[in-house]
Amino acid sequence: MGIVAELPRAVRNVWSVSFGGGLESYRPTPSTTVYEGPHRHLKRYARATPATGNPVLLVPPLAVTTACFDLRPGQSLVGFLLEQGRQPYVIDYGEFGYADRDLGLEDWTDDILPEAISRVSEEHDGRGVDIIGWSLGGVLALLTAASHADLPIASITCLAAPIDQARTAFLIPLRLVSKVTGGREMALATKIMGGIPQEFVRLGFRIQAIDRELAKPMYLARNAFDTEALAKMEATDRFMASMPGYPGRSYWQIYRSLVLRNELATGSIRLRSDLVIELSKVTCRVLLAGSRSDVVVPAASVRRGLDVLPNAEVEFVEVSGGHLGLVSAADTTWPAIEEFLSR
């Protein structure tokens, strides 16, 4: 009798997430602008009380929105940091178009991120900044710290940072093909298109999470009565549908140096013929967090950082969840972050 009574709600739930307007609209945590420029919008999340500890700068990877840190209530690293009394900031890169095709990773490591770190520190009378980067965002934070020893960086937390791409199974075919082609097909494609369009990025992320996509009908059926579970699924789908594209030069550097040559696993990366960044120059505290169930960046790929950061105080922690899910893993990732920052 109870199931029969609840059946209309279950039907509404499934209809809303599948064909309707959704179970809930996106309501980001309130924030204010610290400064804004091309591909550098620094935002400070609103607090009702004075913050304690170091300010925290959230660094997303390229080709995603800042919603990765703030999916919805209960899935928001931003909300957790605020609850812990901390003051979080986030750097938003915005959209990329053909005019941005020449942007390289060094634009982030030498300009965009150093400026953001310095401005956050200035907002707090010169205090050190705790950085939390997801995926490539963690790599960019490490490369920035290695390039600029004078920056006020107190610590770096890398969530699913791709240090050793040889550990990522779905990249093996690409690496094998590249031994024949040298990656020339990707170099040509990014040059013609000026980057990777947002439609390709969104499709690629869904392909990487193909097991989730295939299991979605069964998940809907199993959780038709669970509004909260479906709202979490909806938040992830909404995030994946909002991904922007990659600027051409940056994507080619990622593909060539991180995927094909796997340079970070050796402790350095060549961004230009005259620019090599060595991870041995990172000297701050570093927390590496990875998950075995992450097929995009497996835990073993992240753990490689223990070997290539010899002059940093590094520790590794295994958390739960997929590539995006580990960012919002309230039971494992968040406590590990808080314990690390508190020390």
Image (cartoon, grey):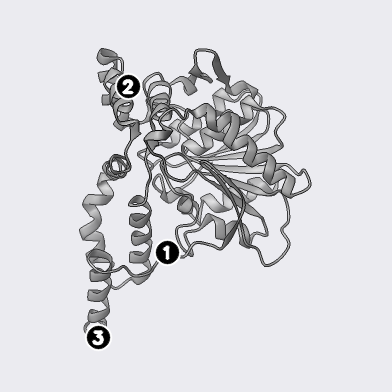
The quarter in which the N terminus is drawn is bottom left
Q: Closer to us: mark 2 or mark 3?
A: 2
Q: From the top left corner, tell me how far across and down residue 105 is, in percent.
A: 49, 29
Q: Is residue 55 above or below residue 228?
A: above
| Residue 5 marker | 3
Image quarter for residue 174? top left
Res 111 visible: yes
Instruction: List x then y, in percent, for residue 229.
Output: 35, 65
Q: Are marks 2 and 1 in contact (CB under 8 Å)?
A: no
Quadrant assignment, res 45: bottom right
Q: Nearer the viewer, residue 331 or 13?
A: 13
Q: Amino acid at mark 2?
A: Ala
Q: Nearer the viewer, residue 4 or 126?
A: 126
In the picture, the disc for residue 187 is 2
Q: Which residue is mark 1?
A: 26
Within 10 Å of the Cα at label 2, are there few (<14), some (14-19), or many (20+) other Cα atoms? some
Q: Earlier in the sequence, mark 3 or mark 1?
A: 3
Give x and y (percent) for residue 123.
72, 49
Q: CA distance from mark 2 to mark 1?
A: 37 Å
On the rendered structure, is 62 left or right of 146?
left
Count neighbours of disc 3 (C-alpha within 10 A) and say few if under 14, some if 14 to 19, many if 20 or more.
few
Q: Is residue 16 above or below residue 256?
A: below
Q: Amino acid at mark 3?
A: Ala
Q: Nearer the viewer, mark 2 or mark 1?
A: 2
